[in-house]
Image (cartoon, helix red, strand yellow):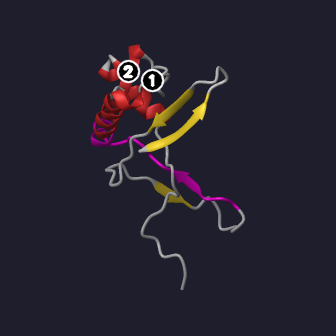
Amino acid sequence: MPVSQFPTRAGEFVYSLGSVIERQMSIGSLTLQSKDPHVQPRVQENFCAHDDDVRRLIDGVRFALEVGEHDAFDHLNAGVRSPSAAVIGDEDALADWIRNVASSGFHPSCAARMGP
């Protein structure tokens, strides 16, 4: 998923690519903390709680890196800024990086009824 392109302070154009899982295996939860409707519920997203999600995101990141090496991106390519080369080269470090940066780009939801 192309995320953005923007100029750096040095005037270079850079871009970012993201990896998205549309049907994740990890399951989150929403828990009421009070009977008071003004108290926000506790939302536990549980991103990357399932190993299959991490594996698929690793594959997506590696694919994004491969796409970024294509000649068509040479005019934008100032090098990979994140994750670092050390993380890219280490499967466990890449999995940890993914667990730390994974988030929802959209609104968390479920099959809960939202009205009468």
**Total marks in image:** 2
| Residue corresponding to mark 2 | 93
Determine the residue positioned at 37% across, 25% down.
94
Looking at the image, residue 10 sits to the left or right of residue 23; the answer is right
| Residue corresponding to mark 1 | 83
Q: Position of residue 10 (x, y in %)?
A: 64, 20
What span is in magenta? 39-55
The three-letter amino acid code for the residue at tag 1 is Pro
Q: Residue furthest top?
A: 86
Q: Residue furthest right?
A: 38
Q: Work out whether 37 lies above or below 64.
A: below
- Mark 1–mark 2 contact, CB under 8 Å? yes
Is residue 65 shown to the viewer in this render? Answer: no
Q: Nearer the viewer, residue 60 or 40?
A: 60
Looking at the image, tell me whether mark 1 or mark 2 is earlier in sequence order.
Answer: 1
Q: Nearer the viewer, residue 39 or 105?
A: 105
Please name which of the two marks, 1 or 2, marks the residue nearer to the observer.
1
The three-letter amino acid code for the residue at tag 2 is Ala
Q: Quadrant of the N terminus?
A: top left
Looking at the image, residue 52 sits to the left or right of residue 106; the answer is left
Determine the residue positioned at 32% across, 33% down.
58
Q: Quadrant of the C terminus?
A: bottom right
SS category of the residue bearing label 1: loop
